[in-house]
Image: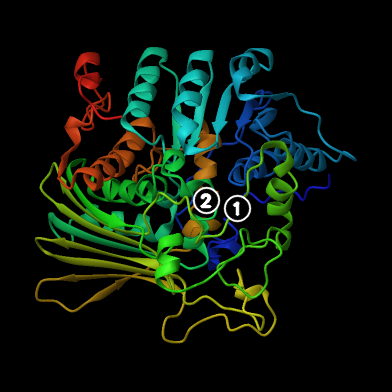
Amino acid sequence: MTSPVTSPVDQNPTAPLPASSASTQPGEGVVPQFAPVPQGRPRRRYAVVGTGHRAGMYVGALVGEHADVGEIVAWCDPNPGRMDYYDGVVGQAQGLDGAAGLPRYAPDGLEAMVAEQRVDVVVVTSLDRTHAELVDRALRAGADVVVEKPLTTDAAGCRRITTAVAETGRDLVMTFNYRYAPRNSSLREVIASGRIGQVTSVHFEWALDTVHGADYFRRWHRDKANSGGLLVHKSSHHFDLVNWWLGDVPARVYASGALRFYGDKAADERGLGERPARGTGTAGDPFSLDLTADPRLKALYLDAENHDGYVRDQDVFAPGITIEDNLAVLVDYAGGATLTYSLNAHSPWEGYRVTVNGTAGRAELEVVERGFVEVDEDGNAVLDPSATPGAATSDPLRPEGEHLTVQTHWHRTEEVAIPAGIGGHGGGDAILLKDVFRRDLRLGEDPLGRAAGHLDGVRAVAVGIAANRSLLTGQPVLVEDLGLGVDLRDGAPQAADAAAAGAPA
């Protein structure tokens, strides 16, 4: 199988491509400084567990910019077709005519893989519901862990991971790439500076458009048992940002939401009629995804279906969707601030708005990642209009861009300059990867505290887990009643009996 070398900036193909994805010149002070690799130091040995699309970011980094500090030594996945693809990526990067021929293991062989291949770090990019088990097993097998968000999907998973970290003393890196986006870092700097005083409330609105938002309803994320729903899978990014901006922890959560746009019931109510079971081979439908249009998706999923039957391009209006597409959450923080949060997964444009109110003023961040969804002459959604000749690439009334403003009492509004980043997720991916693979070489402390560990991961999913419980009960949920296995404020382990007694899964 021929595999293109994966870029370290591995943007989801349905997500908007920010201007930073083509930038190689970040703003001053955005990228941390790192010392040269000491001469003769051996490279760390990495194994990748879960070889779906998201693994590409880490594979690309380890065969590219960070090949001097780390190497991939093994794959672990139940699907041999996807391991074939990435083995080809490594082989091409090594200048081979074919695949690299790295050792392969099924998930039940994780411990043997760590021992036999002398693995230093396991990178976990598997289905969300598998994170807790795989992280626990990797730590206990003697490896450190890098894990994609979310840390896990439920309270039981939090307890399992926090116990494993406490008992093994090993390291866990949580990859919250949005922290590294300069626009989000700039807002943290504004808050930390005290310019708007003590924060009293935050309003955070996230809009996913009908290309990117729909994608969560095509794939395994559509089943809440796999992903925890958007409140855990997607919103853990957003809740982590608020936790990090405020330097605080969530205390009480109330949520409301439903599946109102996608799914068979909503489709029937709008009279959409009979629809194709999958997107591949379907023309003229902006809600369909044809896997043959993207070589990587074709190789990872369409060509690998025969191994496990997983269909990546399911119809977003088909039965079986158990996650919500409209969500509203109210969070009370331990320090006194309140968060109002909303997520919509069928917006005509994509981006987010954040308002932070303080005792001395107000900060506002507005980000337009894609101003509208372009369709071609046949009615198909154009994933990247900028790559399509003749396509309109911007809406003049909603141009792509980002603006951060601050207004203090009795003063005019001031705009805060946002430095350039590099790579996907608002310019944060490539910067995150430097911290993931070179943390021990960093020169000086990061004043923004962007690196995240397991406690940050628990704090982020705590909101989503509590919100999911609130959706079921219709009542507010105290985070301390979830039994997450750790005190969110100081990281102290909770007593085993307190964490387990009556705690929801």
Percent from the top left, x then y, of residue 445? 38, 38
Judging depth in this view, the residue of 365 and 295 nearest the camera is: 295
Q: Is residue 414 visible?
A: yes
Q: Secondary structure at mark 2?
A: helix
Q: Could you tell me which quadrant the C terminus lies in?
A: top left
Q: Mark 1 touching mark 2, by CB under 8 A?
A: yes
Q: Residue at x 42, y 58 (%)?
A: 182
Left or right: 487 as drawn, with respect to 85: left
- Indicate the amino acid at tag 1: Val
Left or right of residue 207, residue 34 in this image: right
485 relative to 21, above or below: above
Q: Residue furthest right?
A: 97
Picture coordinates of residue 21 (x, y %)? 58, 62
Which residue lies under the disc numbered 1? 9
Rendering coords of residue 247 (x, y %) = 23, 44
Residue 338, percent from left and from top: 15, 53
In the image, residue 423 sits, relative to residue 458, either above or below, namely below
Distance from disc 1 to disc 2, alpha carbons, whole Å, reads 6 Å
What residue is shown with label 2?
429
